[in-house]
Image: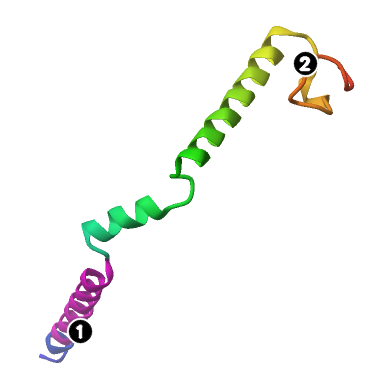
Amino acid sequence: MGPFRKALVVGIVLGVGAGVGSALFVLVTPGEERIQAMLKEMPGQDPRSVEETARNKQLVLATLQEAAATQENVAWRKNWMGGSGGGRSA
């Protein structure tokens, strides 16, 4: 009976621990409304930031397209905004 009782006590303790952990998780996690509010407050969601990110992506894409079309090593450029020249080439 000793090992059975010990296993039963261990099972009960683990079950209680899991129950307490689950209850605390449910109490601490924010509701759906709070999640939506937090997502709206995140940086990068305002229109100016979105436009700036889109412009940066356009510049990177244009640079990659130009690099694919030429033999010049665009990584050596001093001025990434400008066209050819101004830096070392491979």
Residue 84 magenta: no
Q: Is residue 78 above or below residue 83?
A: below
Q: Quadrant of residue 79?
A: top right
Question: Which secondary structure lies at badge 1?
Answer: helix
- Asked if the residue at tag 1 contacts the one at tag 2, i.e. Cβ–Cβ closer than 8 Å, the answer is no
Eye-nearest disc, 2 or 1 = 2
The label number, if any, that marks residue 39 in the structure image: none
Q: Residue at x 69, y 7 (%)?
A: 69
Identify the residue under disc 2.
83
> Relative to residue 52, is residue 24 drawn left or right?
left
Residue 18 magenta: yes
Q: Residue at x 67, y 20 (%)?
A: 63
Q: Is residue 45 above or below residue 69?
A: below
Chain part drawn in magenta: 7-29
Q: Is residue 64 above or below residue 39?
A: above
Q: Quadrant of residue 2?
A: bottom left
Please, which residue is most extreme toward the left here? Answer: 1
Residue 1 position within the rendered picture, expressed as x and y whole percent measured from the top left: 10, 90
Gap in Å between the C-alphas at discs 2 and 1? Answer: 70 Å
Query: Which color scheme is applied?
Result: rainbow
Residue 7 position within the rendered picture, expressed as x and y whole percent measured from the top left: 17, 82
> Relative to residue 67, is residue 55 drawn left or right?
left
User: What secondary structure is the stretch in magenta mostly built from?
Assistant: helix
The label number, if any, that marks residue 13 in the structure image: 1
- Quarter of the picture holding the C terminus: top right
* Disc 1: CA contacts within 10 A as few (<14), some (14-19) or many (>=20): few
Type of the residue with mark 1: Val
> Relative to residue 42, is residue 10 drawn left or right?
left
Residue 21 position within the rendered picture, expressed as x and y whole percent measured from the top left: 25, 75
